[in-house]
Structures are given as C-alpha cells and as structure tokens.
Amino acid sequence: MTHSDIMESFLSDYFADLQGRADDDPGVYWEFYGSAVCEPADDSSGYDILANPPGPGEDEEEQREVFEFEFSDRPLLPCYNIQVSLSQGPRNWLLLSDVLKRLKMSARMFRATFTHLEVVTIAEAEFYKQASLSQLFSCPEELEGFMPDSKELLDLVEISAELVALLGSSLECLDDRWEPVSRPRS
C-alpha cells in the first residue's frame, strides 16, 4: 500500500462519514494502524510504540500501589516538607516546639536525650515561604500563626522512626494486594 493509497482511503472514508453511512456498511468501523504502516519497511529509524505493549506480570514490583495509614490515639502533629540545605532536597520536619509540647520536655532535655535526632534552625520567613508553596502541604490555616516577614528563628526536628514511636504513632502500609507491612513515617 503506497502513501497515496492510504491517503485516498482515508479521505474517501472521511467524506463517507460526513455524508452518513448505513448501519450495515462495513466502513462504519474504522481500523486504526500504528504510524509504522506509513513508513518504508526497510527503514529501521522508526519505532512502533504499539508493537510490544507491556502485558500483565511485567514490571510487577514497579506497578504496585502502596497505601500508607498513620495511626495515633492523638491528633498528628503538622509535618512540613522543607529544604534546609542546598546539598539535600526537601525532607519531612516537625516543629521542635510542637514535639516538646507533646513529649512535655524542655528543649535542653530533648537535645541532651536525643543527640542523634537532627535538629536544624531556619528563619521563620523562609519556613513560611517553603511551607506555603509546598505542593505536599494541604492545611494553610496551620500557617496562620507564622509571620511571612519575620526574622525569628524556628527549630525543626527531622521525622524518624524513633520520633514517630516517641510521639505514639505507627505507620501501616498496605500494597494493592492488601499485605500489611509496618513501616516508620519518613
């Protein structure tokens, strides 16, 4: 079939569709072929993306969906996805002040007891900017107490499995085959 035959067939079917067809006309249903039918057979520079579609069972691990549920007997503390270093991307942080209230500890006692948990300091204005622009943050009313132009400093503590357990939460993961797997919040 040449390019002109293909174009002629296309145009005649198109105009027949515009004029209307009888229900028993075999041309009512169009057959679609990949773009490869328009390419010369000896041309290996083209690639037919429909030639070998993935079937069931291929790349099964990559296609699995995971649902995460966090359980706690108290309301969860607000989590903020913040980038605190140019050398690392955004990570999940809690306000140290929120953690201290929940654990009923002083900042000095927390830092002395949990020296291995990362605590960083960030300007309130930068924190507000990043939190308000984050696509992962869905509760703008939690930012009402923060000042967008403040030069005050805020302490953040990175979420870890140990911290989640200290706060009384647990994270349960279910994949699309409903196999429960416990995992710490990250």
Image: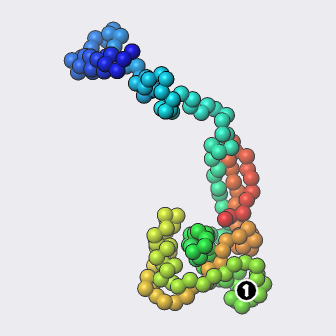
Estimate the x, y position of residue 39 in percent, counting from the top left.
43, 26
Report the amino acid beneath label 1: Arg
Residue 153 vertical placement versus 182 (above, below): below
Q: Which residue is mark 1?
A: 111
Estimate the x, y position of residue 91 in percent, counting from the top left.
61, 69
Estimate the x, y position of residue 105 in percent, counting from the top left.
71, 86
- Identified at 48% across, 89% down, the residue is 151
Q: State the quadrant of the C terminus.
A: bottom right
The residue positioned farthest toward the left in the image shown: 19
| Left or right of 153 in this view: 110 | right
Q: State the quadrant of the N terminus.
A: top left
- Identified at 73% across, 50% down, the residue is 180
Quarter of the image where one finds residue 106: bottom right
Q: Residues within 10 Å of mark 1 (few under 14, many from 20)?
A: some
- Identified at 76% across, 79% down, the residue is 116
Q: Is residue 77 visible?
A: no
Q: Secondary structure at mark 1?
A: helix
Quarter of the image where one finds residue 164: bottom right
Residue 92 vertical placement versus 172 (above, below): below
Estimate the x, y position of residue 10 in percent, counting from the top left.
31, 20
Q: Is residue 11 visible?
A: yes
Quarter of the image where one finds residue 9: top left
- Identified at 56% across, 31% down, the residue is 53
* Frontmost residue, 119 versus 185: 119
| Left or right of 32 in this view: 108 | right
| Left or right of 91 in this view: 21 | left
